[in-house]
Image (cartoon, rainbow, N blue to C red):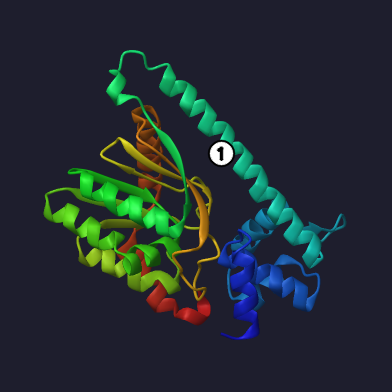
Amino acid sequence: MDSDDAFITRLIGFGLTEKEARLYLHLLKYGPKTPSPLAKSLKTYREDVHRTLNSLIEKGMVNPSLDAPTVYAAVELDTALDAAVEQHESELREMEARKKELEELSRQQRFRPSDEVSTFKILKSVKELVSVGITSIASIGEELLYVVPGHMLVISSVFGISAAAKQLLERGGYARGISDISYSFIKPTQELLDIGEDVRHYDQYQGILFAVMDRRICFSVMKPATTMHDDAPVTLDRQISVLWTDDPTYATYLVATFETLWEQAIPAEQRIRELLEQGPANV
């Protein structure tokens, strides 16, 4: 891994997408630019550059000029990383508030027997997520739905979650998944297709990440393990924050969210063909 790749990998660890990390690094190295030369240097479209710049502006990592044409400049690295940390902390506070709301909703479900009261817990490492994930998949018999980043496909392949899903399919169940599939994640995506999962690609997805099983068991990411991206090492001791619950009300919400995203996504087979035609240098 060269120095640029290492820098990009660590930027991804602060919550940036690969495209955001590459664009921010380019601005750091070569100074302020307008969208057109950025698109040419990064071998992409101006519309794509505009979307990425707007996202970086929201994250406090890029500043636009006030004159025309608009010139975009990278914010000083220390300041930008502080902004990224603050955003993660804000997201974590928001998820904690959502957790309390869900607990209150659960307590209001008076019509359910006492032995069916929902429970909530926080999974704090990849090891715990893998363990609970495999156990949960083994306990269901019908449906697995998930919306995850590309590096979770690697985790699933390496640590046995995909194998558990394969057993679900062999029991007569089915699995559908959505991810933002880049060139680096073609292999784990193809492995899922090979075992019979139905997978789709959602370009630059930045919404809630989750899995829901049999419309009952829910995993919802509170602090994404974004450091595990592309060439970054995937380790079981990596710290994360994932909300686990068996609350059917929350499950219904996640299923509805999934179906909306599913309609907007494209088949993974189509995405893989596009990536292979473009090659790694142009992705």
Residue 268 drawn at (x, y percent) = 33, 62
146 left or right of 68 in image: left
Relative to residue 158, is residue 116 depicted above or below? above
Three-letter code for the amino acid on which mark 1 is drawn: Met
Residue at the bottom extreme, as displayed: 2
The residue carrying pointer 1 sits among few (fewer than 14), some (14 to 19) or many (20 or more) residues within 10 Å by Cα, namely some
In the picture of the structure, the residue carrying the numbered disc 1 is 95
Kindly identify the residue that appears in the image at 29 percent across and 63 percent down: 160
Relative to residue 1, is residue 202 depicted above or below? above
Relative to residue 104, is residue 20 depicted above or below? below
Near-viewer residue (238 or 154):
238
Kindly identify the residue that appears in the image at 59 percent across and 62 percent down: 48
Q: Is mark 1 on a helix, strand or loop?
A: helix
Q: Is residue 74 visible?
A: no
Kindly identify the residue that appears in the image at 26 percent across and 49 percent down: 137
Query: How many numbered discs, if any?
Result: 1
Residue 260 drawn at (x, y percent) = 39, 40
Residue 51 drawn at (x, y percent) = 62, 56
Residue 218 drawn at (x, y percent) = 37, 40
Image quadrant holding the N terminus, namely bottom right
Q: Can residue 231 be seen in this view?
A: yes
Quadrant of the rendered structure where residue 47 is?
bottom right
Relative to residue 245, is residue 234 depicted above or below? below
280 left or right of 249 in image: right
